[in-house]
Image: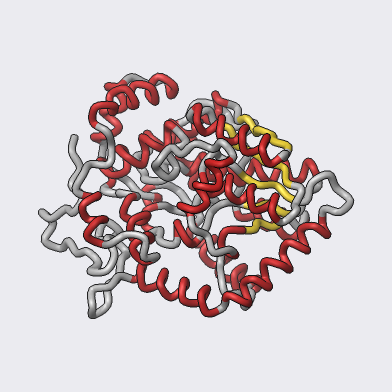
Amino acid sequence: MTISNSTNNNINYKQCSRCVMDTSDTEIVFDDEIFCNHCNSHLLQMEKIKNGKDTVNAQLKRKILEIKESGKNNKYDCIVGVSGGADGCYSAYLCKQYGLRALLVHMDNGWNSTIAVENIKVVADKLQFDYESFVLDWVEFKDLQLSFLKASVPEIETPTDIAILGSLHKLANKYGIKHIIMGCNYYTEGILPKSWHYDAKDKKYVKSIHSIFGKEKLKNFPFFDFWTEAYNKFIKRTTIFYLLNYVNYDRKKAIEILKELGWKDYLEKHHESHFTKLVQTYILPVKFNIDYRKVFLSTSICNGEITREDALKTLKHQYYNESKLDGEIEYVCKKLGISTLEFSSIMSSPTKTYKDYPNNKRITSVIYKIYLFLTKKPEVTKA
């Protein structure tokens, strides 16, 4: 199969004249200059950060003091979620610079590349941080992951997204830690269409898909829905802090620093996972016309790191490596316990959305609006 990055055969196709986001996001909005809502929003946010630099620095200092104070009678001040990628590992590096006693936690779903595992170990060793791996029940997780693949929805990574949040909070509760630090950030992930990924915390949606396509009972899977989030936030008083939103994060410079620790670059964002690599480079763009390079490149354009012309040149090339594709598909299929013929059948089946399965969108939308209103803070940045 080949990928059409521009879908020029679609007479309704439209692309932003400043970044490279386009109507592959069905909810994209353009202004009179054909600038899209994504880059307009991102540039506005970056301007707020720039103008509020002193405020952001003050917020960071207060947060570090708060984290240290909460952990003064504990072995650890905080948990840092790491996958072996640059963002999480650099967050751990910053924790060391700020004098925090961090526990590095990795959610192991069975898909990590060797280089990702080595990166976590070398960073933990060089920074002298304890490291713990939360290993998922593979039989259960594989069954849930395969269920989402068979459901033909773009939220193929929802099982992993839930497991990350669930595992981090379980270990935070186990060790009495009140602060979880994650590497997600506005600088490199400031653009992300909502139409590309439905709410991972909709437990009804997750369970409905698994009830249709799954076989195993999910006895050990670390579910994390809105109510679990509310319990941890308001009862256990556990917070998530997106540290990189409060520093002048330059990913290229961060990578150079990490390399000095012995960290190795795997070149593509989120490709520390074999499964994620196949999902982002092949399954999503080929089956769903969702090319995540567009969000990464558009963010870089807005940040002045690359030109739009260079981004368009990149998108002319198919995302996956054709010479390695068959081997990557065979590897994933073997681990999931399906044949390549069944995988091909899944790829050719009609696409669906969360609307095709039972979900709690109507209820959670109202709850989230109330929640955001009650917890809204006059801060410059939002995680």
**Residue 284 location (% of width, % of height):** 32, 43
In the rendered image of this protein, does residue 138 appear above or below residue 58?
Answer: above
Q: Is residue 177 left or right of residue 215?
A: right
Indicate the quadrant containing the N terminus: top left, top right, bottom left or bottom right: top left
Coloring basis for residues: secondary structure
User: Where, by quadrant of the figure, is residue 128 drawn?
Assistant: top right
**Residue 105 location (% of width, % of height):** 66, 39
Indicate the quadrant containing the C terminus: top left, top right, bottom left or bottom right: bottom right
In the rendered image of this protein, does residue 109 appear above or below residue 356?
Answer: above
Q: Is residue 98 left or right of residue 271?
A: right
In the rendered image of this protein, does residue 349 appear above or below residue 55?
Answer: above
Residue 121 seen from this side:
yes
Q: Is residue 195 left or right of residue 127?
A: left
**Residue at 80% across / 42% down in the picture?**
175
In the rendered image of this protein, does residue 344 appear above or below residue 260?
Answer: above
User: Where, by quadrant of the figure, is residue 237 drawn?
Assistant: bottom right
Q: Is residue 117 left or right of residue 149?
A: right
